[in-house]
Image: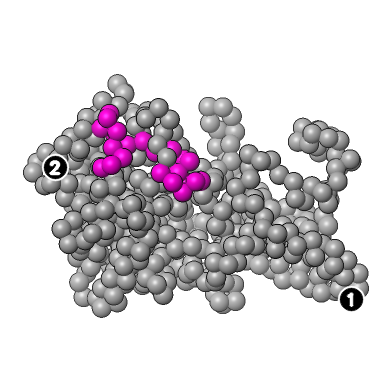
């Protein structure tokens, strides 16, 4: 089961198994009145189990699943409520709590995400309200909170520090403005160096269902501790790019051994079919998705492979291979070959790639094309690159830009923004894909038009405007990446200046 799924249902199972009900207070009573449309005491919870708002329904339960939950509730639950079944449940709850503590300690009480963070903290309080575990949870709640213009919010992660820093590094390097950007790059280098995970989680990793993490990078911070394949690839690629710049400007490079550790980690993450998933190997069968209990999200049961992770690892290993041609050379060549075949297999007949982590086919095309280019393929010798470029060019708008709606993620069909509007970030992704595929040599006009759109969109203070949301997870939940509006236009214009204007 995918870590984000199992880490949420783990504490939920504990709270349900303990039949925990908190003390009634004025706040609880007030919340019940606010949240429910009928008096709380009149709710039919058996009927409510299969009720949902039609606006939230993305993954309807199949009949098989409803039959399973009804059987468990009507037939199995009564057995577990009384001896000797209650003894089995008590042992199971003990096991669950052990795994909750392991997750807490492995992540310095940040936890994988905000949902299991809050639920794990509550489980620790239910187990012992005066426990050291509960006390350690409290200060790390702040890792998720931030104040926006319209009030307090809770993030969907404890940040995207490493992810954004790596992308910003590539963008700044592309400008060739080293004298101006040197101080920024030095700070980015410090962050990237500090956030690398340099050890594995404690204990028997197989028993705890964890993948080795030594050498990897997380999405956010080292304290968080969960390694991810594409984040590790970005960290590796950024570290290698910074190592080629003057040390007196960006600082001392990360040691070769730590770079080797990351490469070893990446090689261990490849699935048998050549693809890469996010946190772990794809361990089980797709038919298990029929038991997805979340009506709101799709594809949550397994850690599914995706074009972004597969491409990112390909790019990272290809960059490493140029600087360290002797280390694990056969393994890396084989990995890149299988990964490139997987990228081609991800491609749809219309030349597009569906992306799992941002909006959507534009983002997928950027990763798909750059991954194949990193694997040594070209527009001339690779039909997948040609089809990908043709797909992008077919979506360019009269303004010169690209604009894709979040509905593409939900419906899995390319959907333009309402009114034919362009989007800065979509435009930058398309530009980068076309530039690295050699579009300037074929016909630079689409790139000129896109660059004009980006330049004209910049505001007087140098900032770019915030537009529609660009991130997504599990098909149906959108993520705001506020830094994207500056990172990707700068990167696209930097490469445009480098590879189009100068040529």
Q: Residue furthest toward the right?
A: 83
Taking the image as shown, residue 78 lies to the left or right of residue 201, namely right
Within-10-Å neighbours for mark 1: few <14, some 14–19, many 20+ = few
Residue 425: % across, % down? 35, 38
Taking the image as shown, residue 139 lies to the left or right of residue 45, namely left
Q: Which range of residues does the magenta coloring cover?
A: 393-414
Q: Earlier in the sequence, mark 2 or mark 1?
A: 1
Residue displayed at 58% across by 41% down: 154
Along the line of sight, which residue is nearer the eye, 157 or 399?
399
Residue displayed at 86% across by 35% down: 39
Residue at image mark 2: 443
Whether residue 262 appears in this view of the structure is: no
Residue at image mark 1: 84
Q: Residue 218 appears in which quarter of the rendering?
A: bottom left
Helix, strand or loop: magenta stretch: loop
Color style of the picture: one colour
Magenta-span inclusion, residue 406: yes
């Amino acid at each position: 089961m995918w870590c984000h799924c199992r880490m949420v249902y783990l504490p939920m199972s504990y709270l349900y198994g303990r039949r925990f009900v908190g003390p009634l207070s004025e706040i609880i009573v007030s919340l019940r009145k606010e949240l429910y449309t009928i008096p709380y005491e009149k709710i039919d919870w058996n009927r409510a189990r299969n009720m949902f708002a039609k606006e939230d329904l993305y993954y309807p339960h199949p009949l098989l699943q409803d039959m399973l939950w009804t059987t468990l509730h009507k037939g199995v639950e009564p057995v577990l409520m009384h001896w000797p079944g209650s003894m089995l449940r008590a042992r199971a709850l003990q096991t669950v709590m052990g795994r909750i503590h392991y997750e807490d300690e492995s992540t310095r009480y940040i936890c994988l995400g905000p949902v299991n963070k809050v639920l794990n903290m509550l489980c620790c309080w239910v187990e012992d309200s005066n426990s050291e575990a509960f006390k350690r949870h409290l200060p790390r709640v702040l890792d998720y909170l931030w104040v926006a213009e319209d009030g307090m919010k809770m993030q969907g992660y404890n940040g995207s520090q490493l992810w954004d820093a790596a992308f910003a590094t590539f963008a700044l390097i592309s400008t060739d403005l080293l004298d101006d950007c040197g101080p920024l790059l030095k700070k980015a280098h410090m962050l990237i160096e500090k956030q690398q995970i340099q050890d594995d989680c404690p204990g028997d990793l197989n028993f705890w269902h964890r993948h080795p993490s030594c050498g990897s990078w997380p999405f956010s911070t080292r304290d968080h501790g969960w390694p991810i394949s594409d984040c590790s690839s970005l960290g590796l690629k950024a570290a290698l790019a910074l190592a080629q710049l003057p040390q007196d400007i960006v600082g001392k490079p990360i040691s070769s051994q730590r770079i080797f550790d990351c490469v070893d980690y990446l090689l261990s993450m490849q699935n048998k079919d050549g693809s890469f998933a996010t946190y772990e190997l794809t361990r089980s069968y797709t038919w298990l998705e029929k038991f997805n209990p979340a009506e709101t999200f799709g594809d949550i049961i397994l850690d599914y492979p995706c074009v972004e992770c597969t491409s990112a690892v390909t790019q990272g290993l290809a960059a490493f291979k140029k600087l360290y041609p002797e280390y694990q050379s056969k393994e890396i060549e084989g990995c890149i070959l299988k990964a490139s075949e997987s990228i081609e297999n991800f491609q749809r007949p219309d030349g597009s790639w569906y992306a799992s982590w941002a909006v959507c086919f534009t983002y997928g095309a950027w990763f798909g094309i750059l991954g194949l280019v990193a694997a040594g393929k070209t527009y001339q010798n690779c039909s997948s690159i040609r089809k990908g470029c043709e797909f992008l060019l077919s979506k360019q708008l009269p303004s010169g830009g690209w604009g894709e709606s979040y509905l593409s993620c939900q419906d899995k069909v390319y959907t333009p923004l309402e009114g034919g509007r362009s989007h800065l970030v979509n435009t930058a992704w398309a530009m980068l894909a076309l530039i690295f595929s050699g579009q300037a040599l074929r016909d630079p006009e689409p790139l000129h038009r896109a660059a004009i759109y980006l330049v004209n969109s910049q505001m007087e203070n140098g900032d770019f405007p915030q537009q529609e949301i660009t991130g997504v997870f599990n098909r149906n939940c959108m993520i705001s990446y506020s830094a994207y509006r500056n990172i990707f236009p700068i990167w696209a214009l930097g490469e445009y200046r480098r590879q189009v204007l100068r040529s």
